[in-house]
Amino acid sequence: MRAPGPGTSCIFCGLIRRESPAHVVYEDDRTLAFLDLFPLSRGHTLVVPKRHVDRITELPREDYSAMLGAVVEVCRRIERLSRHYNVGVNQGELAGQIVFHLHFHIIPRYENDSPFSRTRPRSRLSEAEAAEVLRELASGNSA
Ligand code: ZN
């Protein structure tokens, strides 16, 4: 069972409610996109529905369009950093899901990188790095 009330103890719901700070890349009334705090590569961004659902199969149909639209918009912005990126959803613990609020990863790829290496240390995003990446990603509509 989940905590009482949808998302009350969920860290992503906390970001959506601005109870904790997020490095917001994009936001609309149904979705929020923010920098991953432990990025696999420079510009690693997560896109979440504001409605708390654990799984993509629980996302209500009325959110499909906003969800995909936000993913595409963030991809356009990520292309300012690199034309190469991975878009993915980890669904279930065995697939590497850590936060049980649906999220799409958009992971920019660079020359000679290895973001999925298990031996690569994941360091926490610094405020300085976040500010610099947001200057490139968070402004304007790329549509
Ligand atoms: Zn949540």
Image (tube, rainbow, N blue to C red):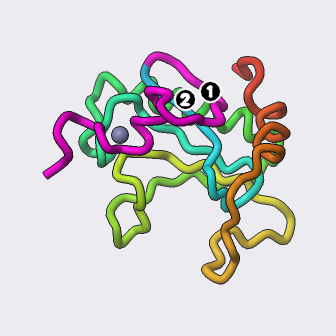
Q: Quadrant of the C terminus?
A: top right
Q: Amino acid at mark 2?
A: Ala
Chief SS of the magenta region: loop
Is the residue under label 1 in contact with that under label 2 (CB below 8 Å)? yes
Q: Residue at x 76, y 44 (%)?
A: 127
Q: Nearer the viewer, residue 9 or 63?
A: 9
Left or right? Give the position of 43 relative to 112. Answer: left
Secondary structure category for the residue under label 2: helix
In percent of width and height, residue 130 lies at 76, 43
Q: Amino acid at mark 1?
A: Tyr
Quadrant of res 133: top right
Q: Residue at x 61, y 80 (%)?
A: 118
The outermost residue toward the left is 1
Magenta span of residues: 1-29
Residue 84 forms part of the magenta stretch: no
Q: Is residue 31 above or below residue 29?
A: below
Q: Is residue 132 above or below residue 119?
A: above
Q: Residue at x 73, y 28 (%)?
A: 138
Whether the residue carrying mark 1 lies under 8 Å from ligand 1 is answered with no
Q: Residue at x 39, y 36 (%)?
A: 13
Between the C-alphas of marks 2 and 1, the distance is 8 Å
